[in-house]
Amino acid sequence: MSDIPGAGRRATPAELRVPIVMVLVTTLLVGCNVGGAGSPGGAGSTGSSPDPSTATASEDSSSGTSPRPMAQHRLDKLAHLLERVEVLNRVPPDFELRDVDYTSPNDAVAYFVAPGINDRGTIIATTDDNWAHAARIRISDELADLVDYAPLGRGAVAIKAQDQYPTRMYPPFVLYPDGDTKPLRVTDRRMPDDDTEVVGRAVHDLLFYYRDERSPGLWAADVEAAVVFPIARSPNGVVHQHLPGRDRTLMNVLEYRRGIAGGVWRYETSPDDGRSWHRTDVSLPLGHMNLHWYTDVTTHAVGPGRRQAIAMSHAWEDLPLYMWELWWTDDEKEFRRVRLPRDRLRFGGMAFASDGALLIAEVGGSDHYCDQLTCNRPGRIWRLASGDAVPELLPSAPPLFGPFWAVGIRFSGGLIVARTGMRTIAVSKDGYVWTDVTPGRRDLERRRPG
Protein backbone atom coordinates (compact mmCIF):
# COMPACT_ATOMS: atom_id res chain seq x y z
CA MET A 1 0.00 0.00 0.00
CA SER A 2 2.93 2.37 0.38
CA ASP A 3 3.81 1.77 -3.29
CA ILE A 4 0.72 3.37 -4.78
CA PRO A 5 0.10 4.28 -8.43
CA GLY A 6 1.89 7.40 -9.58
CA ALA A 7 4.93 7.02 -7.33
CA GLY A 8 7.14 10.11 -7.51
CA ARG A 9 4.23 12.47 -8.07
CA ARG A 10 1.02 13.26 -6.24
CA ALA A 11 -1.51 10.62 -7.24
CA THR A 12 -5.03 11.47 -8.33
CA PRO A 13 -7.97 10.81 -5.97
CA ALA A 14 -9.08 7.90 -8.16
CA GLU A 15 -5.63 6.29 -7.99
CA LEU A 16 -5.49 6.77 -4.23
CA ARG A 17 -8.87 5.36 -3.33
CA VAL A 18 -8.91 2.09 -5.26
CA PRO A 19 -6.16 0.26 -3.26
CA ILE A 20 -7.45 1.14 0.20
CA VAL A 21 -11.04 0.27 -0.70
CA MET A 22 -9.99 -3.19 -1.88
CA VAL A 23 -8.01 -3.85 1.30
CA LEU A 24 -10.74 -2.44 3.52
CA VAL A 25 -13.64 -4.40 2.02
CA THR A 26 -11.68 -7.65 2.18
CA THR A 27 -10.59 -6.99 5.76
CA LEU A 28 -14.04 -6.03 6.99
CA LEU A 29 -15.79 -9.00 5.37
CA VAL A 30 -13.25 -11.50 6.69
CA GLY A 31 -13.32 -9.94 10.16
CA CYS A 32 -17.10 -10.10 10.25
CA ASN A 33 -17.41 -13.68 9.00
CA VAL A 34 -14.69 -15.43 11.01
CA GLY A 35 -15.08 -14.22 14.55
CA GLY A 36 -16.02 -10.61 14.04
CA ALA A 37 -14.54 -7.21 14.43
CA GLY A 38 -14.52 -5.69 17.85
CA SER A 39 -16.78 -2.99 19.13
CA PRO A 40 -14.84 -0.24 20.91
CA GLY A 41 -17.84 1.95 21.64
CA GLY A 42 -16.46 5.41 22.22
CA ALA A 43 -18.57 8.26 23.51
CA GLY A 44 -21.57 8.75 21.24
CA SER A 45 -21.13 5.45 19.40
CA THR A 46 -23.95 2.99 18.99
CA GLY A 47 -22.05 -0.26 19.54
CA SER A 48 -21.39 -1.90 22.89
CA SER A 49 -17.96 -2.39 24.39
CA PRO A 50 -16.34 -3.73 27.53
CA ASP A 51 -15.84 -1.09 30.19
CA PRO A 52 -12.22 -1.41 31.31
CA SER A 53 -13.13 -0.59 34.90
CA THR A 54 -15.85 -3.26 35.19
CA ALA A 55 -14.68 -6.10 32.93
CA THR A 56 -15.00 -9.43 34.75
CA ALA A 57 -13.62 -11.92 32.26
CA SER A 58 -11.10 -14.53 33.37
CA GLU A 59 -7.69 -13.12 34.26
CA ASP A 60 -5.93 -16.19 32.92
CA SER A 61 -3.92 -15.09 29.89
CA SER A 62 -4.52 -18.48 28.25
CA SER A 63 -8.30 -18.08 28.27
CA GLY A 64 -8.83 -14.65 26.71
CA THR A 65 -12.27 -14.17 25.17
CA SER A 66 -12.90 -13.51 21.48
CA PRO A 67 -13.62 -9.97 20.31
CA ARG A 68 -17.26 -9.03 20.20
CA PRO A 69 -18.86 -8.90 16.75
CA MET A 70 -19.26 -5.46 15.17
CA ALA A 71 -22.73 -4.57 13.91
CA GLN A 72 -23.07 -4.33 10.14
CA HIS A 73 -24.01 -0.65 10.27
CA ARG A 74 -20.74 0.06 12.08
CA LEU A 75 -18.79 -1.89 9.48
CA ASP A 76 -20.54 0.21 6.85
CA LYS A 77 -19.67 3.40 8.72
CA LEU A 78 -15.99 2.45 8.88
CA ALA A 79 -16.04 1.53 5.19
CA HIS A 80 -17.54 4.97 4.45
CA LEU A 81 -14.59 6.59 6.24
CA LEU A 82 -11.78 4.54 4.75
CA GLU A 83 -13.00 4.59 1.15
CA ARG A 84 -12.63 8.39 1.37
CA VAL A 85 -9.27 8.42 3.16
CA GLU A 86 -6.43 9.57 0.91
CA VAL A 87 -3.35 7.36 0.69
CA LEU A 88 -0.17 9.38 0.10
CA ASN A 89 3.23 8.56 -1.34
CA ARG A 90 4.70 11.62 0.41
CA VAL A 91 3.77 14.28 2.96
CA PRO A 92 2.93 17.55 1.14
CA PRO A 93 5.25 20.50 1.91
CA ASP A 94 2.54 22.65 3.52
CA PHE A 95 2.11 20.12 6.34
CA GLU A 96 3.98 20.57 9.63
CA LEU A 97 5.19 17.78 11.89
CA ARG A 98 3.11 18.10 15.03
CA ASP A 99 4.39 15.05 16.93
CA VAL A 100 6.29 11.79 16.55
CA ASP A 101 6.16 8.77 18.87
CA TYR A 102 8.62 5.88 18.82
CA THR A 103 7.69 2.54 20.36
CA SER A 104 11.09 1.01 19.51
CA PRO A 105 14.18 2.29 17.68
CA ASN A 106 12.54 1.22 14.38
CA ASP A 107 8.80 1.59 15.00
CA ALA A 108 7.25 5.05 15.03
CA VAL A 109 4.14 7.10 14.27
CA ALA A 110 4.10 10.72 13.08
CA TYR A 111 1.24 13.21 13.04
CA PHE A 112 1.06 16.18 10.64
CA VAL A 113 -1.25 19.19 10.21
CA ALA A 114 -1.36 22.16 7.82
CA PRO A 115 -1.59 25.26 10.06
CA GLY A 116 -3.93 27.97 8.79
CA ILE A 117 -5.06 26.03 5.70
CA ASN A 118 -8.73 25.03 5.65
CA ASP A 119 -9.75 21.44 4.95
CA ARG A 120 -6.21 20.09 4.56
CA GLY A 121 -6.97 17.79 7.45
CA THR A 122 -4.67 15.43 9.31
CA ILE A 123 -1.91 13.14 8.05
CA ILE A 124 -0.79 10.11 10.05
CA ALA A 125 2.29 8.16 8.94
CA THR A 126 3.66 4.97 10.44
CA THR A 127 6.87 2.95 9.93
CA ASP A 128 8.63 -0.17 11.16
CA ASP A 129 12.10 0.72 9.76
CA ASN A 130 12.66 4.27 11.10
CA TRP A 131 11.14 5.99 8.06
CA ALA A 132 13.05 4.15 5.35
CA HIS A 133 9.52 3.16 4.31
CA ALA A 134 6.17 4.35 5.63
CA ALA A 135 2.40 4.22 5.16
CA ARG A 136 0.70 7.63 5.06
CA ILE A 137 -2.97 8.56 5.07
CA ARG A 138 -4.74 11.92 5.06
CA ILE A 139 -8.16 12.46 6.63
CA SER A 140 -9.68 15.74 5.46
CA ASP A 141 -11.45 18.12 7.83
CA GLU A 142 -14.58 17.71 5.72
CA LEU A 143 -14.58 14.00 6.47
CA ALA A 144 -13.52 14.18 10.15
CA ASP A 145 -12.39 17.29 11.97
CA LEU A 146 -11.06 15.46 15.05
CA VAL A 147 -8.53 12.64 14.62
CA ASP A 148 -6.89 10.85 17.56
CA TYR A 149 -4.28 8.10 17.48
CA ALA A 150 -2.41 5.73 19.79
CA PRO A 151 0.78 3.83 18.77
CA LEU A 152 0.39 0.08 19.33
CA GLY A 153 3.98 -0.98 18.63
CA ARG A 154 5.54 -2.96 15.75
CA GLY A 155 4.79 -0.08 13.41
CA ALA A 156 1.01 -0.18 13.91
CA VAL A 157 -1.18 2.71 15.03
CA ALA A 158 -4.78 2.82 16.25
CA ILE A 159 -6.77 5.72 14.76
CA LYS A 160 -10.16 7.14 15.71
CA ALA A 161 -11.87 9.89 13.73
CA GLN A 162 -15.01 11.89 14.34
CA ASP A 163 -16.81 14.76 12.70
CA GLN A 164 -18.15 17.19 15.28
CA TYR A 165 -20.56 19.17 13.04
CA PRO A 166 -22.67 17.18 12.36
CA THR A 167 -21.76 14.60 14.98
CA ARG A 168 -20.47 11.44 13.34
CA MET A 169 -18.38 8.88 15.23
CA TYR A 170 -16.38 6.42 13.15
CA PRO A 171 -15.27 3.10 14.64
CA PRO A 172 -11.50 3.01 15.26
CA PHE A 173 -9.14 1.09 13.02
CA VAL A 174 -5.48 0.02 12.87
CA LEU A 175 -3.09 1.23 10.17
CA TYR A 176 -0.02 -0.94 9.51
CA PRO A 177 3.31 0.15 7.99
CA ASP A 178 2.56 -1.81 4.79
CA GLY A 179 -0.64 0.23 4.33
CA ASP A 180 -3.03 -2.52 5.44
CA THR A 181 -5.97 -1.63 7.70
CA LYS A 182 -8.09 -3.61 10.17
CA PRO A 183 -10.98 -2.65 12.47
CA LEU A 184 -9.75 -2.24 16.05
CA ARG A 185 -11.31 -4.86 18.31
CA VAL A 186 -11.62 -5.04 22.09
CA THR A 187 -11.61 -8.06 24.41
CA ASP A 188 -12.18 -8.34 28.12
CA ARG A 189 -9.57 -7.85 30.81
CA ARG A 190 -6.79 -10.46 30.93
CA MET A 191 -3.05 -10.85 31.38
CA PRO A 192 -0.60 -10.04 28.55
CA ASP A 193 1.54 -12.73 26.97
CA ASP A 194 4.66 -12.92 24.80
CA ASP A 195 2.73 -11.96 21.65
CA THR A 196 1.28 -8.72 23.04
CA GLU A 197 2.58 -5.19 23.52
CA VAL A 198 1.97 -3.18 26.70
CA VAL A 199 0.62 0.21 25.58
CA GLY A 200 -0.27 1.96 28.85
CA ARG A 201 -3.58 3.80 29.01
CA ALA A 202 -3.33 5.58 25.64
CA VAL A 203 -5.72 3.10 24.03
CA HIS A 204 -8.28 3.62 26.80
CA ASP A 205 -8.19 7.36 26.17
CA LEU A 206 -8.57 6.81 22.43
CA LEU A 207 -11.60 4.56 22.85
CA PHE A 208 -13.43 6.24 25.69
CA TYR A 209 -12.34 9.91 25.60
CA TYR A 210 -11.69 10.00 29.38
CA ARG A 211 -15.34 9.21 30.11
CA ASP A 212 -14.43 6.93 33.03
CA GLU A 213 -13.16 8.94 36.00
CA ARG A 214 -12.08 5.79 37.82
CA SER A 215 -8.58 4.42 37.25
CA PRO A 216 -8.69 2.48 33.96
CA GLY A 217 -5.41 0.64 34.49
CA LEU A 218 -3.01 -0.34 31.73
CA TRP A 219 -3.82 -1.81 28.34
CA ALA A 220 -2.07 -4.20 25.95
CA ALA A 221 -2.38 -4.94 22.24
CA ASP A 222 -2.19 -8.02 20.05
CA VAL A 223 -0.89 -6.00 17.13
CA GLU A 224 -1.22 -8.54 14.33
CA ALA A 225 -4.83 -9.33 15.30
CA ALA A 226 -5.73 -5.63 15.83
CA VAL A 227 -7.02 -6.48 19.31
CA VAL A 228 -6.62 -4.45 22.53
CA PHE A 229 -7.57 -5.31 26.09
CA PRO A 230 -7.20 -4.00 29.67
CA ILE A 231 -4.46 -5.73 31.67
CA ALA A 232 -5.74 -7.59 34.71
CA ARG A 233 -4.69 -6.30 38.13
CA SER A 234 -2.85 -3.25 36.73
CA PRO A 235 -3.04 0.27 38.18
CA ASN A 236 -3.26 3.45 36.15
CA GLY A 237 0.06 5.01 35.13
CA VAL A 238 2.45 6.05 32.38
CA VAL A 239 4.45 3.18 30.86
CA HIS A 240 8.10 3.54 29.81
CA GLN A 241 9.75 0.86 27.68
CA HIS A 242 13.21 0.24 26.18
CA LEU A 243 14.81 2.07 29.11
CA PRO A 244 18.59 2.70 28.79
CA GLY A 245 20.64 0.11 30.62
CA ARG A 246 17.58 -1.69 32.04
CA ASP A 247 17.19 -4.56 29.56
CA ARG A 248 13.51 -5.44 29.02
CA THR A 249 12.23 -3.88 32.23
CA LEU A 250 8.96 -1.95 31.94
CA MET A 251 8.31 1.01 34.23
CA ASN A 252 4.82 2.16 35.16
CA VAL A 253 5.06 5.66 36.68
CA LEU A 254 2.37 6.49 39.23
CA GLU A 255 3.96 9.89 40.02
CA TYR A 256 3.90 11.87 43.27
CA ARG A 257 2.10 10.73 46.42
CA ARG A 258 1.80 13.33 49.15
CA GLY A 259 1.25 12.46 52.78
CA ILE A 260 3.53 9.41 52.64
CA ALA A 261 6.78 9.96 54.55
CA GLY A 262 6.86 13.62 53.55
CA GLY A 263 6.12 12.86 49.91
CA VAL A 264 7.28 10.07 47.58
CA TRP A 265 7.67 9.45 43.86
CA ARG A 266 5.94 6.13 43.15
CA TYR A 267 6.62 3.79 40.26
CA GLU A 268 6.41 0.09 39.44
CA THR A 269 8.68 -2.15 37.39
CA SER A 270 7.91 -5.34 35.51
CA PRO A 271 10.53 -7.84 34.27
CA ASP A 272 7.97 -10.05 32.50
CA ASP A 273 6.16 -7.82 29.98
CA GLY A 274 3.50 -6.55 32.37
CA ARG A 275 2.41 -9.80 33.99
CA SER A 276 3.75 -8.80 37.43
CA TRP A 277 4.79 -5.49 38.97
CA HIS A 278 7.03 -4.43 41.85
CA ARG A 279 6.21 -1.10 43.51
CA THR A 280 8.87 1.35 44.75
CA ASP A 281 8.51 4.64 46.64
CA VAL A 282 11.41 7.12 46.38
CA SER A 283 11.52 9.98 48.88
CA LEU A 284 10.67 13.32 47.24
CA PRO A 285 10.36 15.81 50.12
CA LEU A 286 7.82 18.31 48.80
CA GLY A 287 5.71 18.25 51.95
CA HIS A 288 1.96 17.76 51.81
CA MET A 289 1.25 19.69 48.59
CA ASN A 290 -0.48 18.15 45.61
CA LEU A 291 1.95 18.09 42.73
CA HIS A 292 -0.26 20.24 40.49
CA TRP A 293 -0.23 22.94 43.21
CA TYR A 294 3.55 22.76 43.29
CA THR A 295 4.28 22.87 39.56
CA ASP A 296 2.43 23.20 36.24
CA VAL A 297 4.38 20.53 34.32
CA THR A 298 6.41 17.63 35.68
CA THR A 299 8.95 16.02 33.33
CA HIS A 300 10.42 12.66 34.32
CA ALA A 301 13.51 10.90 32.91
CA VAL A 302 14.86 7.41 33.62
CA GLY A 303 18.51 6.46 33.22
CA PRO A 304 20.75 3.40 33.54
CA GLY A 305 21.50 1.95 36.95
CA ARG A 306 19.23 3.64 39.45
CA ARG A 307 19.20 7.12 37.95
CA GLN A 308 16.03 9.15 37.63
CA ALA A 309 15.42 12.89 37.31
CA ILE A 310 12.35 15.09 37.77
CA ALA A 311 12.05 18.63 36.40
CA MET A 312 9.52 21.00 37.95
CA SER A 313 8.35 23.55 35.36
CA HIS A 314 5.97 26.48 35.09
CA ALA A 315 4.02 27.24 31.91
CA TRP A 316 2.87 30.67 30.78
CA GLU A 317 0.60 31.10 27.79
CA ASP A 318 2.45 31.23 24.44
CA LEU A 319 5.86 30.90 26.10
CA PRO A 320 8.21 27.93 26.63
CA LEU A 321 8.31 26.06 29.91
CA TYR A 322 10.49 27.51 32.66
CA MET A 323 12.24 24.96 34.85
CA TRP A 324 12.26 26.02 38.50
CA GLU A 325 13.73 22.91 40.10
CA LEU A 326 15.58 19.75 39.09
CA TRP A 327 15.60 16.67 41.33
CA TRP A 328 17.95 13.69 40.90
CA THR A 329 18.38 10.22 42.40
CA ASP A 330 21.12 7.71 41.70
CA ASP A 331 20.03 5.21 44.36
CA GLU A 332 16.20 5.26 43.98
CA LYS A 333 15.91 5.85 47.71
CA GLU A 334 15.80 9.64 47.79
CA PHE A 335 15.61 12.50 45.29
CA ARG A 336 18.00 15.38 45.93
CA ARG A 337 17.65 18.85 44.46
CA VAL A 338 20.26 19.86 41.86
CA ARG A 339 21.76 23.36 41.93
CA LEU A 340 21.37 24.92 38.49
CA PRO A 341 23.56 27.73 37.09
CA ARG A 342 20.44 29.88 36.57
CA ASP A 343 17.30 30.27 38.62
CA ARG A 344 15.05 30.00 35.59
CA LEU A 345 15.86 27.87 32.55
CA ARG A 346 13.68 27.93 29.44
CA PHE A 347 13.15 24.21 29.38
CA GLY A 348 12.75 21.89 26.39
CA GLY A 349 12.80 18.47 28.00
CA MET A 350 15.47 16.02 29.13
CA ALA A 351 16.69 12.46 28.69
CA PHE A 352 19.48 10.27 30.05
CA ALA A 353 22.39 9.28 27.82
CA SER A 354 23.66 5.70 27.85
CA ASP A 355 26.57 6.63 30.16
CA GLY A 356 24.22 8.00 32.83
CA ALA A 357 24.64 11.70 32.05
CA LEU A 358 21.45 13.76 31.92
CA LEU A 359 20.89 15.76 28.72
CA ILE A 360 18.83 18.92 29.21
CA ALA A 361 17.40 21.01 26.37
CA GLU A 362 17.34 24.79 26.71
CA VAL A 363 14.97 26.82 24.52
CA GLY A 364 16.44 29.98 22.98
CA GLY A 365 14.93 33.01 21.32
CA SER A 366 13.25 36.04 22.81
CA ASP A 367 11.64 36.09 26.21
CA HIS A 368 8.69 38.30 25.34
CA TYR A 369 5.04 37.41 24.83
CA CYS A 370 4.27 35.82 21.49
CA ASP A 371 0.93 36.36 19.75
CA GLN A 372 1.73 34.28 16.65
CA LEU A 373 0.04 30.97 15.93
CA THR A 374 3.46 29.36 15.98
CA CYS A 375 6.54 30.99 17.50
CA ASN A 376 9.55 29.14 16.18
CA ARG A 377 12.60 29.05 18.43
CA PRO A 378 16.11 27.59 18.48
CA GLY A 379 17.54 25.47 21.27
CA ARG A 380 20.65 23.74 22.56
CA ILE A 381 21.49 20.70 24.70
CA TRP A 382 23.41 20.69 28.00
CA ARG A 383 25.08 17.65 29.58
CA LEU A 384 24.91 17.06 33.33
CA ALA A 385 27.32 14.26 34.29
CA SER A 386 25.88 13.80 37.78
CA GLY A 387 23.69 15.50 40.33
CA ASP A 388 26.75 17.32 41.72
CA ALA A 389 28.29 18.36 38.40
CA VAL A 390 28.10 21.65 36.49
CA PRO A 391 26.17 21.47 33.19
CA GLU A 392 28.27 21.73 30.02
CA LEU A 393 27.16 22.18 26.43
CA LEU A 394 27.00 18.90 24.51
CA PRO A 395 29.45 19.37 21.58
CA SER A 396 27.96 16.65 19.36
CA ALA A 397 24.36 17.80 19.81
CA PRO A 398 22.26 18.75 16.79
CA PRO A 399 20.96 22.35 16.71
CA LEU A 400 17.40 22.41 17.97
CA PHE A 401 14.61 24.31 16.22
CA GLY A 402 10.84 24.21 16.01
CA PRO A 403 7.58 25.54 17.46
CA PHE A 404 8.12 26.79 21.02
CA TRP A 405 5.92 23.99 22.40
CA ALA A 406 7.99 21.33 20.60
CA VAL A 407 11.60 22.56 20.76
CA GLY A 408 13.73 20.18 22.78
CA ILE A 409 14.38 16.51 23.45
CA ARG A 410 12.59 13.53 24.95
CA PHE A 411 13.06 9.81 25.34
CA SER A 412 10.76 7.73 23.13
CA GLY A 413 10.89 4.01 22.38
CA GLY A 414 14.57 3.52 23.17
CA LEU A 415 15.76 6.68 21.39
CA ILE A 416 16.50 10.26 22.38
CA VAL A 417 14.46 12.36 19.97
CA ALA A 418 15.49 15.98 19.27
CA ARG A 419 13.32 18.44 17.33
CA THR A 420 15.48 20.11 14.64
CA GLY A 421 12.93 21.74 12.31
CA MET A 422 9.32 22.05 11.26
CA ARG A 423 9.52 18.64 9.56
CA THR A 424 12.74 17.13 10.90
CA ILE A 425 14.14 15.42 13.99
CA ALA A 426 17.44 13.87 15.05
CA VAL A 427 17.56 10.59 16.98
CA SER A 428 20.26 8.98 19.11
CA LYS A 429 20.60 5.68 20.95
CA ASP A 430 23.42 6.85 23.23
CA GLY A 431 23.04 10.65 23.35
CA TYR A 432 26.24 11.36 21.39
CA VAL A 433 25.87 9.96 17.86
CA TRP A 434 22.81 11.41 16.12
CA THR A 435 20.95 10.52 12.93
CA ASP A 436 18.93 13.11 11.03
CA VAL A 437 15.44 11.89 10.17
CA THR A 438 12.51 13.32 8.23
CA PRO A 439 9.46 11.39 9.49
CA GLY A 440 7.11 10.30 6.76
CA ARG A 441 9.69 9.76 4.02
CA ARG A 442 13.08 8.20 3.39
CA ASP A 443 15.71 10.71 4.51
CA LEU A 444 18.30 9.35 6.93
CA GLU A 445 21.74 10.85 7.48
CA ARG A 446 24.20 9.84 10.21
CA ARG A 447 25.83 12.69 12.18
CA ARG A 448 29.44 12.43 13.24
CA PRO A 449 30.26 13.44 16.84
CA GLY A 450 32.00 16.77 17.32
Image: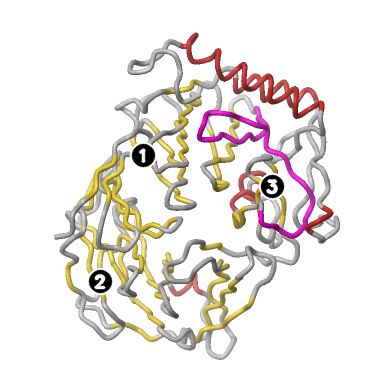
Residue 405: x and y in percent read 34, 51
Marks 1 and 2 sit apart, C-alpha to C-alpha, by: 33 Å
Q: Residue furthest bottom?
A: 261
> Against 35, is 117 above or below?
above
Tell me the number on the disc at residue 116.
Answer: none
Precedes in sequence: disc 2 or disc 3: 3
Q: Is residue 315 visible?
A: yes
Q: In terms of secondary structure, where does tag 2 sit?
A: loop
Point 38% across, 86% down: residue = 336
Q: Residue 439 — which label? A: 1
Q: Compute the Cα span from label 1 to label 3.
A: 26 Å
- Amino acid type shown at disc 3: Val
Q: Sort mark 1 into few (<14), some (14-19) or many (20+) by Cα contacts within 10 Å.
A: many
- Tell me where the magenta segment starts and ends, as one range: 168-194
Quadrant into which the C terminus falls: bottom left
Q: Which residue is mark 3?
A: 228
Residue found 60% across the figure and 22% down from its top = 82
At label 1, the amino acid type is Pro
Residue at position x 55%, y 48% in the image: 153
Binning the other alpha carbons within 10 Å of mark 3 as few (below 14), some (14 to 19) or many (20 upward) gives many
The residue under label 2 is 344
What residue appears at the point 26 percent right and 75 percent down from the top-left corner?
A: 384
Residue 410 vs residue 53, the one in the foreground: 410
Q: Horizontally, is 260 left or right of 287 in the view? A: right
N-terminal of the two: label 1 or label 3?
3
Q: Looking at the image, is mark 1 or mark 2 earlier in the sequence?
A: 2
Decide whether residue 214 is among the magenta residues. Answer: no
Residues marked 1 and 3 touching at CB (< 8 Å): no
Q: Is residue 192 magenta?
A: yes
Query: Which SS does the magenta portion mostly show?
Result: loop
Residue 112, relative to residue 357: is it above or below? above
